[in-house]
Image: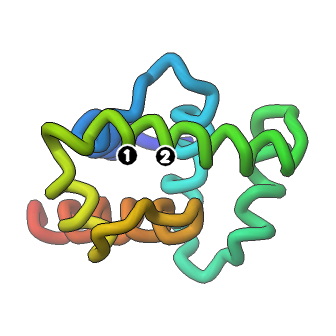
């Protein structure tokens, strides 16, 4: 389970990415980043499997919902917060699911270590 302080930091990061909270992918991203934060070595396939188990869903639905949330955020941020995507994902192009999840987990880890 994710602690409240980490959840708030993660939620703030996702808000910077313009990802709407009402999307199912938002919940899956929260779960996935938390799992990557706690276990950076987990493979993306196992990650999707664990998220699907946690939310009583299917792997394909998890993957699609995360992709949709990233696409929405990317499209929404093109005008206002595109530099956030570039800063965290190190690219000017839309990140893949795994690039996004891993980059956000790394950013969260960096924020945690800078506040210790």
User: Which quarter shows the C terminus?
Assistant: bottom left
Taking the image as shown, residue 16 lies to the left or right of residue 76, namely left
Determine contact: label 1, label 2, CB under 8 Å.
Answer: yes
Q: Where 27 falls versus 85 (above or below)?
A: above
The residue under the point 49% across, 46% down is 70
The percent position of residue 65, horizontal first and vertical second, equals 67, 38
Q: Residues within 10 Å of mark 1 (few under 14, many from 20)?
A: many
Whether residue 12 is visible, yes or no, is: no
The percent position of residue 2, horizontal first and vertical second, equals 48, 43
The percent position of residue 73, horizontal first and vertical second, equals 39, 39
Whether residue 71 is visible, yes or no, is: yes
Taking the image as shown, residue 37 lies to the left or right of residue 75, namely right
Residue behind mark 1? 74
Taking the image as shown, residue 32 lies to the left or right of residue 84, namely right
Q: CA distance from mark 1 to mark 2?
A: 6 Å
The residue under the point 63% across, 27% down is 24
User: Which quarter shows the N terminus?
Assistant: top right
How many numbered marks does the figure carry?
A: 2
The residue under the point 37% across, 40% down is 75
Q: Residues within 10 Å of mark 2 (few under 14, many from 20)?
A: many
Task: Determine whether the residue tagged by mark 2 lies in a helix, strand or loop.
Answer: helix
The circle drawn on residue 41 is: none
Q: Where 115 falls versus 99 (above or below)?
A: above
Residue behind mark 2? 70
Task: Determine whether the residue tagged by mark 1 lies in a helix, strand or loop.
Answer: helix
Name the foreground residue: 11 vs 78. 78
Q: Where 113 falls versus 50 (above or below)?
A: below
Q: Quadrant of residue 47?
A: bottom right
The residue under the point 58% across, 60% down is 97
């Amino acid at each position: 389970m994710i602690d409240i302080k980490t959840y708030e930091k993660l939620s703030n990061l996702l808000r910077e990415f313009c990802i709407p909270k009402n999307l199912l992918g938002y919940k899956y991203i929260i779960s996935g980043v938390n799992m990557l934060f706690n276990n950076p070595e987990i493979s993306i396939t196992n990650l999707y499997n664990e998220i699907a188990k946690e939310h009583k869903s299917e792997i394909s639905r998890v993957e699609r919902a995360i992709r949709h949330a990233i696409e929405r955020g990317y499209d929404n941020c093109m005008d206002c917060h595109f530099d956030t995507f570039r800063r965290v994902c190190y690219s000017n192009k839309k990140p893949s699911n795994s690039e996004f999840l891993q980059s956000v987990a790394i950013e969260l880890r960096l924020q945690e270590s800078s506040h210790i």
